[in-house]
Amino acid sequence: MATDIKSMSLSGRKIDVSEKEMTFKEKMYVFAIAKGMGITLRHFFKPKVTIMYPEQKREFSPVYRGRHILMRDENGAERCTACGLCALACPAEAITMTSAERKKGEENLYREEKYASVYEINMLRCIFCGLCEEACPKEAIFLTEDMVSSDFKREGFIYGKDKLVMPLEDKIH
Amino acid sequence: MDVALFIEKFAIILIVFGITMFIALYSTFAERKVAAFMQDRPGPNRAGWGGIFQPLADGVKMFTKEDFIPNTPNKFLFILGPGLFIVTALMTSAVVPWGGTLHLFGRDISLQAADINLAILFVFGVVSIGVYGIMIGGWASNNKYSLLGAVRASSQMISYEIAMGLSIIAVLMMTGSLSLRTIAEQQHGFFDWGQHWLSWNVFKQPLAFFIFLICAFAETNRTPFDLPECESELVGGYHTEYSSMKLGFYLFAEYINMFISSAIIATVFFGGYNYPGMDGVATHIGPNIAVLLGVAVLFAKTLFFIFFYMWVRWTVPRFRYDQLMNLGWKVLFPLSIVNIVLTAVVILGRQYFNF
Ligand code: SF4
Ligand code: SF4
């Protein structure tokens, strides 16, 4: 069966474009404009959907991925052992760290013998995918429900340990 | 010269000026609110209760911005442009009758700055001088986008002035006067018992009203005819190079124009300060109350038309330039001539055959 390329439809959903002339009524546009104005007037009285941000906050879903936190264990020691797996897993290459060896007497500060003396996440690079959280063998890094706050300078978005490590008072585990 | 008359006119001019400024100021706010509401947003609502001080914040912002003058050989014209535009915008308010005649302190105070018998011609004249404000500003900016915007503005305004003038001629043939006060007085009350028909001109000349309305949109450079400041093609149009209060003047004058043209539409077609039952109010409650109520009615009508301007702006997309010219020259122009002929036939028919 000879099929004309014009009548062929691979998806079976082909719709012919109609090129019919507009009628006089349509050409006047007045009725179309009146209809459009009816629609905008209806929206004028509709309830507004805006969330008034600082006073009113949108509820996040339980799996929301916000800014990171470096966890402490139940004794208040940092869990991170600077293995670098999070940095390796990170698709945006947002994480850098420097490792150091735990000294005598610091057992209450760092859980493992090796720890991160510098740990930085560049929040401008981070895409909040949560892969670092999945990669971590020590359950040291988590993404919280907080949002990254705005800043005037780019440097302010490179979060060091001062911002990332969970405050001592909050230790939960 | 009569000192009392001088004081009276001076007071009226000052009050009208103040009200015009106030309404123009709050039109900018209303525009943003209307736009927001039509897009399901609450609009500006942080400055004061419900954002009521937003225009003041905008004004402070405008004043404190850097006042930049581009490298142009026409510095004087560059400054003259916005000044001329706002002056012409304010001038038209002089001939609008804001109400009937008040009886105060043993005087008859006519609520109108100048009752000249060529009021409509005056309005048309001043409005067309307004084009110079745009044209000079766009020319002196030394920028091709500004120039294109200015050229668009002037050709658009000239084209639509013709249809506008012709549409109003049909009204003038019935009123027989160019004075806005006479036109307003002829639409007395709401029902014309002598002619067994509603007395407002919009019911006698619906087609003229329709053409006039469309042309008023074009004259005030409002959407769907805002091609002179079409952002997507011309950056900012004729005011691309303007900043600070000079830009503020242009934007402000646009709102003043909107207010004045709304007032003129309300006066010419919607009965001005007349309202149903005004005679009853005058006899039973008091003539001055009736007049003041008339002023309130006129302002209500005017504000409705301002709202209508905004309503259209946030509904209808912008025309293409050839469509704009087609509409002006090939549709509105012949239509208004047909309207004149129809009006003439009806007037003559009424004279000779009494129908
Ligand atoms: S959330 Fe994703 S992008 Fe951000 S630091 Fe972790 S792995 Fe990198
Ligand atoms: S956060 Fe976890 S994955 Fe990253 S370096 Fe520390 S222990 Fe390793």
Image (tube, coloured by chain):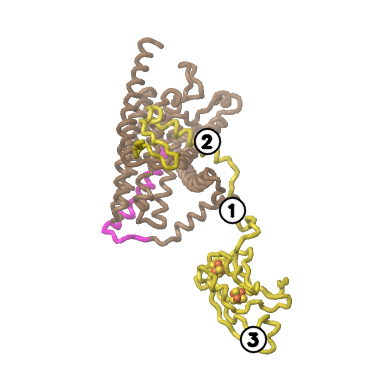
Chain colours: A yellow, B brown
**B3 vs B173, nearest the viewer:** B173
Residue B273 rendering spot, x and y as whole percentages: 49, 31
Task: List the residue tagged with mark 2.
Answer: B300
**A9 vs B79, nearest the viewer:** A9
Could you tell me the amino acid type at mark 3?
A: Arg
Residue closest to the far bottom: A104
Classed neighbour count for the residue bearing mark 2: other residues with Cα under 10 Å, few (<14), some (14–19), many (≥20): some
Q: How many marks?
A: 3
State the SS at label 3: loop
Residue closest to the far front: A1
State the SS at label 1: loop
Q: Are marks 2 and 3 in contact (CB under 8 Å)?
A: no
Compared across the picture, whether B230 is left or right of A87 comes to: left
Chain letter for mark 1, please. Answer: B
The CA span between labels 2 and 1 is 25 Å
Task: List the residue tagged with mark 3.
Answer: A102
Compared across the picture, whether B49 is left or right of B267 comes to: right
**A141 vs B77, nearest the viewer:** A141
The range drawn in magenta is B68-94
Q: Are marks 3 and 1 in contact (CB under 8 Å)?
A: no
